[in-house]
Image: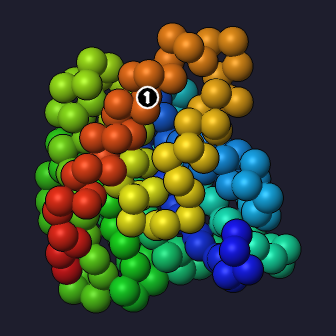
Amino acid sequence: MNGKSIYTSVIMAGFGGQGLMFIGKLLAYSAMKRGLHVTWIPSYGPEMRGGTANCTVVVSSEPIGSPVIQKPESLIVMNNPSLEAFEPRLKAGGLLFLNADLVTRPATRTDINVIALPANDEAVRVGEHRAANMVVFGAYVARGGILSRDDVAAGLSGLFGEKAASKLEVNMKAFDAGVKYAQAAPARA
């Protein structure tokens, strides 16, 4: 932690089944293994399948007073309904990460930074169509600066347990694709 004060908040939103709860847990778990304080709050829509799903994660070097965030610093959006619901809540100057393969309209706000990346296409390219969440997570981590690649790999190993060897490689490929995309594509307002 290098004595530097850390605080960040993110809402991750999309349809159930897109792996948003997983990357939220991965962020919280990886940060916790680094000795940071975390909160992770999941929220599911009332639908049985295909409903909305989102989670809020707060990471801090200090104890967290409240896990409830009105204006997150970052927002990961995987579909149009989530953009509609959460774009107004993003803090001015915040980072919006869009899955450009499924979000068909641009962000409307001009006071935020947008990183739109083809997460589904990148996931297919690395060999796992279900890893679009990890592509977007890679972009988020690359721009957030709180976790390292090693932190994420350790977090994945811990969450996957004995399944780690078979799933770690493809998930890290997807993560790396997101990192590369975020580093090459400047944020746009």
* Quadrant including the N terminus: bottom right
Question: Which of the 4 quarters of the picture holds residue 134?
Answer: top left
The x, y position of residue 63, in whole percent, is: 85, 74
Name the side, left or right, on which 70 lies relative to 84. Answer: right
Residue at point 69%, 12% (across, down):
162
Which element carries disc 1, helix, strand or loop? helix
Residue at point 56%, 64% (across, down):
146
The x, y position of residue 129, in whole percent, is: 29, 22
Q: Nearer the viewer, residue 125 or 79?
A: 125
What is the image's colouring?
rainbow
Total tally of numbered discs in the picture? 1
Residue at point 27%, 58% (across, down):
182
Q: Nearer the viewer, residue 134 or 100?
A: 134
The x, y position of residue 158, in whole percent, is: 70, 30
Residue at point 54%, 27% (across, down):
48
Dot 1 amino acid type: Asn
Question: Which of the 4 quarters of the picture holds residue 122?
Answer: top left
Query: Can residue 42 be seen in the rendering of this structure?
Result: no
Name the side, left or right, on which 121 lies relative to 23. Answer: left
Residue at mark 1: 171
Name the side, left or right, on which 83 lies relative to 49. Answer: left
Q: Is residue 119 above or below residue 67?
A: above
Q: Is residue 129 above or below residue 73?
A: above
Query: Can residue 168 be seen in the rendering of this structure?
Result: yes
Name the side, left or right, on which 33 lies relative to 115. Answer: right
Mark 1 crowd level (few <14, some 14–19, many ≥20, 10 Å Cα): many
Q: Is residue 61 above or below residue 37?
A: below
* Quadrant including the C terminus: bottom left
